[in-house]
Amino acid sequence: MSRLRVVSYNIHKGRSGLMSRVRLNELRLGLYGLGADLVFLQEVQGRNERAGVLDAQHESLAAALHLDMVYGCNAVRRYTDHGNALLSRFPILSHENLNVSDHRLEQRGLLHAQVRIGDHMVHCFVVHLGLFGASRGRQAEALIRRIDEVVRDGEPVLIAGDFNDWNDDLSATLVERLGLHEVFGSAQLTKGGGPPKLRETVRLLRQSFVRLRDGAGPSQPLPALSAGSLPVTARPPRTFPSAMPMFRLDRIYQRGFAVRRARVLRGMPWTRISDHAPLMAELELP
């Protein structure tokens, strides 16, 4: 059995704050302290010809963390480019960056890497979807097609990144068509997301009582309960803006793992590093 720690983080090209200060040193130290095995990064600057300190961020982070890495370039400017990256403690056997740009205003990609973890081939997808709902829908369809085409039955899947899906419109599609589970909906213990709001708790309890009365069977599972016997909301946590999170933009989806713990990393130093709060999950492979 393999236990691993997974982190997903939109690093905002290594800058944050009103003065757009460089935060790469703090980012390196923060990630190093987490001891992650797989790090899914978005808004990584692969090239910066004007500020050398911001150049090749995937390489400098991987070197500091002693991890293997791959980079998928999506948005190309005259002096810079940026995209997604995967850092891994395990061997990355292959990778491909898929262009899923939906219009001229946004350049988007899906970075797909195959990682060997013990006896398992794990398919890792780093995603950063578009700002418009229709675009996100088409990009989710591209992700589904990719998984249907190349992932064999029984091979574990991890999909993490900035989905920009603040209304949580895509989760049902990903769950129903790919058999995925969002880690905060299936974790035995969650931290950092805050307790369920009273309205949400009452709604889920009412739903539980109604379904018990009506005889909910295996095809109608009751809402999961936390260790404190309160329903755990299946909605992803709020991660943006990191100083006062209001929007549910970031996700980690999995298939084939047991989820032991899921956390949103709040407070210092994370609020200084990026406008997104990072997610961390502890998973097990059978």
Image (spheres, grey):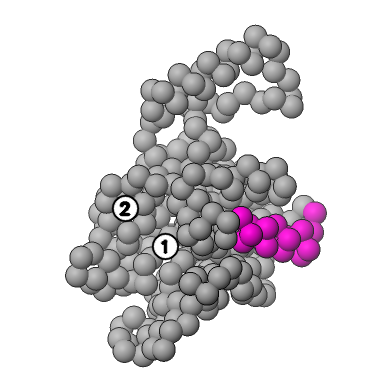
Residue 198: x %, y % from top left: 38, 23
Q: Residue at x 31, y 89 (%)?
A: 50
Q: Is residue 68 located in the magenta-colored stretch of the structure?
A: no
Nearer the N terminus, badge 2 or badge 1?
1
Residue 119: x %, y % from top left: 72, 60
Name the amino acid type tagged 2. Ser
Q: Which residue is mark 1?
A: 10
| 186 horizontally vs 270: left or right | right
- Residue 226 drawn above or below residue 37: above
Which secondary structure lies at badge 1?
strand
Q: Outermost residue toward the left?
A: 19
Asked whether the viewer can see residue 1, the reply is no
Residue 279: x %, y % from top left: 44, 52
Mark drawn on residue 242: 2
Instruction: Specify the principal SS of the magenta part.
Output: helix
- Residue 110 drawn above or below residue 222: below
Residue 21: x %, y % from top left: 23, 72
Q: Residues within 10 Å of mark 1 (few under 14, many from 20)?
A: many
Mark 2 vs 1: CB contact within 8 A: no
The one of 140 and 72 positioned closer to us in this rendering: 140
Which secondary structure lies at badge 2?
loop
- Residue 47 drawn above or below residue 226: below
Q: Quadrant of residue 123?
A: bottom right
Q: Label 2 vs label 1: CA separation?
A: 11 Å
Q: Residue at x 36, y 60 (%)?
A: 33
* Region in magenta: 137-153
Q: Residues within 10 Å of mark 2 (few under 14, many from 20)?
A: many
Name the amino acid type tagged 1. Asn
| 82 horizontally vs 160: left or right | left
